[in-house]
Amino acid sequence: MPEPTTSPPIYKDPAQPSEARIADLLARMTLAEKIGQMTQVEKNSVTPKAVAKYFIGSVLSGGGGSPPKNTVAVWAEMVASFQQAALETRLGIPILYGVDAVHGHANLEGATVFPHNIGLGAVDDPDLMFAIGQATAVEMRATGIHWNFAPVVSIPQDIRWGRTYEGYSEDTTLVTRLAVPYLQGLQTPPENWSGGPIYVLATPKHYLGDGGTAFGSSKTINIQPFLLDQGDTRLTEAELRALFLPPYQAAVEAGALSIMASFNSWNGDKLHAHHYLLNEVLKGELGFEGFIVSDWQAIDQISDDYDAAVVAAINAGIDMVMTPYDYKTFIDSLTRAVNEGSVSIERIDDAVERILRAKFALGLFEQPFSDPALVEAVGSQDHRSLARQAVRQSLVLLKNEHRTLPVPKDTPLIFVAGEGAENIGLQAGGWTIEWQGKSGMITPGTTILEGIQAAISPGTQVEYNRFGRFDQVFDASGQPAIADIGIVVISEQPYAEGVGDQADLTLAQADSDLIARARERCQKLVVILLSGRPLVLSDQLPMMDALVAAWLPGSEGAGVADVLFGDYPFNGRLPYTWPWTNDQLPLNIHNAQSGEALFPFGFGLLEE
């Protein structure tokens, strides 16, 4: 007689409704397995063996968290090693692997690096945002990663904040309009996808009010004196809701199943322990059915008593805790809290149910690994063309006297100065290859200088000196040459998060001197500013014939030259108010009086 067949458990049957699968799996889990699902660890602090032993639910790569050899194949192998360990546990629950792909899968060398959000805010094109989301998702899935800690939906109100460039704009409506299609682009599966309804899990962040912290309200974090990051948002509830809640409401309605809580406080109370905002508003009022993940070691800031911090965070509504290093201490603490009754088993079950909902929506039980067919898409010409388009559209023309732009392609002599003209790391900014970013040719792409050299006519002479010293260039009579056009690329050094908090945004003296030197050696001067925020350059503005805000364009710097030489028109509009002086800060659309800004929100010359 044939052996009787046993049906697979409901949770392993993709034909079953996801809620039935969740209920079936949850009923089979021990407390240790549940708490493991609520634990997220940085990949350098955990081994595949430990993932299996502690039933870890999620592993992440922090900024710069690449494998020793930064290639697609090695990324996929690394992620698969953790995934395979999870699948070999008693219940075989796959892990969620997360990464900050905030402007493309930029931890990966060779990935397409899109402009940072500040530049995309200048474009204001929802269709472009959807396409960037899709391209980013494909490059992530090529490495086996299915969770993106993006989009950032902060609405920065003070450009001195080091995360200003991660925000699309200081305007709530614009942020909401761009964040939703990007989220949908990440989460919408491509054609012929046989997994779940979500392709890559998006994570709107940081909930709530991270862009509204008061200057000087931050505490010293790890010996780093932050000024705004992780500080205190001092607003009434009505103000908080009107300014910061709309993108989260829209994201929930668009299908978000993961939201990251914010480091900041609201009127002195840490968001990671804020039951009202996390549980009552987000999960209750907004109807959020996904899970809330904590930020990097953020629950540690709730209390000096770690056990008390864990209890407060979980009871307030945190479902998964990013405990990058000491995950065993977290597991022990939460286990103790449940056994002692400080955290109910119902709260644990609710958290795990929410995490499992996302895992089933991703189809991880059926397709937990990378797709080798996607490898060719990483840094592909199609994706780089999309990024170059985004660069072109993001440029904001702030000044253009004497019809300086567009530059004629047959201009006889062009001088190019500034380190940023030939430096992909400066183009890309923070969150690129490393957490803080890095100067240099850190990933494949095109520089602004290469774009200029490719755009000009054969008879045009281009001379580049990063310091703006052209003493060795002579005219036909043997005198020091005066260029027809000088192009100076001014750039901030890369930074991320509170490391980039800066009290004084006045242009550095070295940059001012560079502009002055170039001014003496050219008939018309174009200044291109690579920055994560507006900088105070009122004193230098009279020396410029043209000024272009190029933001942080990413890997495809040649897109800047596309517009400089007239192949495409200027398109961008300022997503932030641009101050005259540092003393005006914070200056934004909510407090700026008419005529007070050097360039108001929404400004941008489209043609001259």
Image: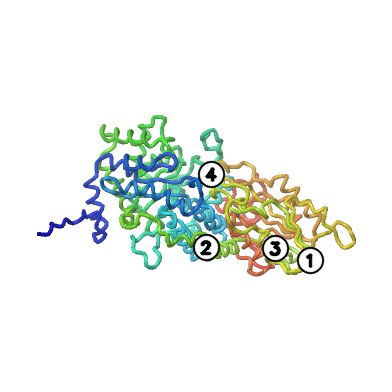
SS for dot 2: loop
Q: Amino acid at mark 4?
A: Glu
Comparing 262 with 184, the one in front is 184
The vertical placement of 536 against 395, above or below, is above
Q: Is residue 577 visible?
A: no
SS for dot 1: loop
Q: Earlier in the sequence, mark 2 or mark 1?
A: 2
Kindly report which numbered mark, 1 or 4, lies closer to the viewer in this rendering.
Answer: 1
102 relative position to 80: left or right: right
Question: Whole-Å distance between the Cαs marked 2 and 1?
Answer: 35 Å
Q: Amino acid at mark 1?
A: Pro
Q: Point out the residue furthest to the right here.
A: 477
Q: 10 Å neighbourhood of mark 2: few (<14), some, or many (≥20)?
A: some
For mark 3, what is the residue? 453
Comparing 506 with 256, the one in front is 256
Kindly report which numbered mark, 3 or 1, lies closer to the viewer in this rendering.
Answer: 3
For mark 1, what is the residue? 412
Q: Amino acid at mark 3?
A: Gln
For mark 4, what is the residue? 497
Residue appearing at x 53%, y 44% in the figure: 497
